[in-house]
Image (cartoon, rainbow, N blue to C red):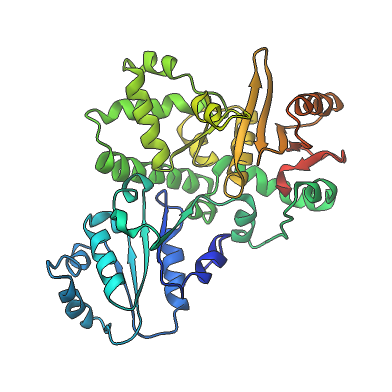
């Protein structure tokens, strides 16, 4: 059964445009499922789909004379006499594919739809001359609204934070909170969500990490000792939702700060971690300062280590915000922090439960930064007008 993702309307709209579609993201987030669905939507019979994990499929595109590739494709019922649709899965297995795609796209009427598992690799996969000829779409683990679709109880999603705050419903909240608790524990990797048995869910999460470590870390990372990178990952788990202190991490690992920076860069570019910068009126200062850490998925946090309930909730909120918003955090010496500043205009604090004092503190901090909207994201139900329920985010 196919479950629609938030990104699907954008992808469908691009099927008839000339640009190459590249779908990327971490392993096991549903890229191949999206590719298969898009393939089924193409009405033309002049179409073909290949999985590059199969070396025989890669061989079709390994001709020195790129024109000769059409002879190979003819064996699969595809020709260059009319518009052709070529779908390629897991393109990172063929480093030369960028040049092939560029040539065929520039010389023939052909639409390419591709998937690849790592932005770290894809940034260097296509020649510079492909700029303006490709569109990259990033896919992530499920948001909570997508999670509910997979559970068969889709809900209408309000766009504005102000609408979310005033549209709370206690009956709906009571219905959704058990599902949110499951999401908090096991996260949003599609194959994990679709499993019913808790032990199977845990086993699937372990398999997702193993696939990432064996597939991306060992094959793409240019590090002599990947065990240090593995150890860094384990050190990061209890730091989810916290600021990264590179010097402390370097001392714990027995490596230089430069090495830690290179590890963090790799983990970020392969979608395993996300780093958000401190809010400032200066873009330069935002990019240069301390950064706050989140992982790809809350289920992965639970699978690899221990984090507090507050950290897990903040990780969930991050997963549901980062797709559509520009995120920063704010802190001032002495402890005054705002968990998320959204699109440089909205302050969000994440709490398991809400008190009037929490609301007053957030308002005062936001006024200093001239932020016009302030809300607390709460796991527990509250009728306060400045509270948004985590289940509604």
Residue reaching furthest left? 64
324 versus 227 height, above or below: below
Residue 337 location (% of width, % of height): 68, 23
In the visual, does 369 lie left or right of 254? right
Please name the residue shown 57% across and 67% down the image: 9
| Pick the front one: 300 or 340 | 340
| Pick the front one: 390 or 73 | 73
Work out whether residue 144 can be spotted.
yes
Please name the residue shown 59% across and 29% down the image: 282
233 versus 108 height, above or below: above
Tally the marks.
0
Quadrant of res 4: bottom right
Residue 335 location (% of width, % of height): 67, 16
212 versus 254 height, above or below: below
Please name the residue shown 31% across and 71% down the image: 105
| Pick the front one: 150 or 324 | 324
Residue 42 location (% of width, % of height): 44, 79
Residue 251 location (% of width, % of height): 38, 13
Work out whether residue 90 can be spotted.
no
In the visual, does 386 lie left or right of 296? right
Please name the residue shown 29% across and 53% down the image: 125
């Amino acid at each position: 059964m196919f479950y629609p993702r938030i990104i699907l309307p954008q992808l469908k709209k691009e099927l008839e445009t000339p640009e190459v579609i590249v779908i990327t993201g971490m392993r096991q987030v549903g890229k191949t499922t999206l590719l298969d669905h898009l393939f089924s939507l193409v009405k033309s019979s002049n179409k073909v789909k290949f999985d590059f994990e199969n070396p025989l499929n890669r061989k079709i595109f390994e001709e020195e004379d790129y024109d000769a590739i059409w002879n190979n494709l003819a064996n699969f019922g595809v020709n260059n006499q009319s518009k052709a649709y070529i779908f390629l899965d897991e393109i990172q297995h063929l480093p030369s594919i960028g040049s092939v795609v560029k040539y065929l796209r520039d010389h023939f009427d052909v639409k390419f739809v591709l998937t690849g598992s790592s932005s770290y690799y894809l940034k260097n996969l296509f020649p510079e001359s492909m700029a303006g000829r490709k569109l990259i779409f990033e896919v992530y683990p499920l948001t909570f609204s997508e999670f509910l679709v997979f559970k068969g109880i889709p809900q209408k999603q309000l766009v504005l934070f102000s609408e979310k705050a005033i549209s709370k419903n206690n009956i709906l909240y009571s219905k959704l909170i058990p599902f949110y608790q499951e999401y908090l524990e096991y996260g949003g990797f599609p194959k994990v969500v679709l499993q019913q048995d808790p032990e199977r869910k845990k086993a699937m999460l372990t398999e997702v990490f193993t696939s990432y470590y064996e597939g991306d870390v060992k094959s793409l990372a240019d590090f002599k000792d990947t065990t240090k990178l593995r150890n860094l990952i384990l050190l990061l788990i209890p730091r989810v939702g916290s600021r990264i202190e590179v010097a402390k991490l370097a001392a714990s690992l027995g490596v230089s700060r430069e090495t830690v920076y290179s590890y963090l860069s790799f983990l970020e570019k392969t979608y395993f971690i996300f780093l958000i910068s401190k809010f400032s009126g200066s873009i330069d200062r935002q990019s240069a300062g301390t950064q706050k850490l989140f992982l790809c998925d809350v289920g992965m946090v639970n699978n690899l280590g221990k984090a507090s309930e507050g950290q897990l909730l903040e990780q969930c909120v991050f997963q549901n915000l980062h797709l559509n918003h520009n995120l920063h955090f704010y802190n001032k010496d002495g402890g005054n922090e705002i968990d998320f500043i959204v699109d440089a205009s909205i302050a969000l604090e994440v709490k398991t439960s809400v008190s009037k004092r929490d609301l007053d503190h957030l308002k005062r901090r936001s006024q200093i930064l001239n932020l016009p909207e302030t809300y607390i994201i709460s796991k527990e139900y509250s009728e306060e007008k400045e509270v948004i329920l985590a289940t509604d985010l």
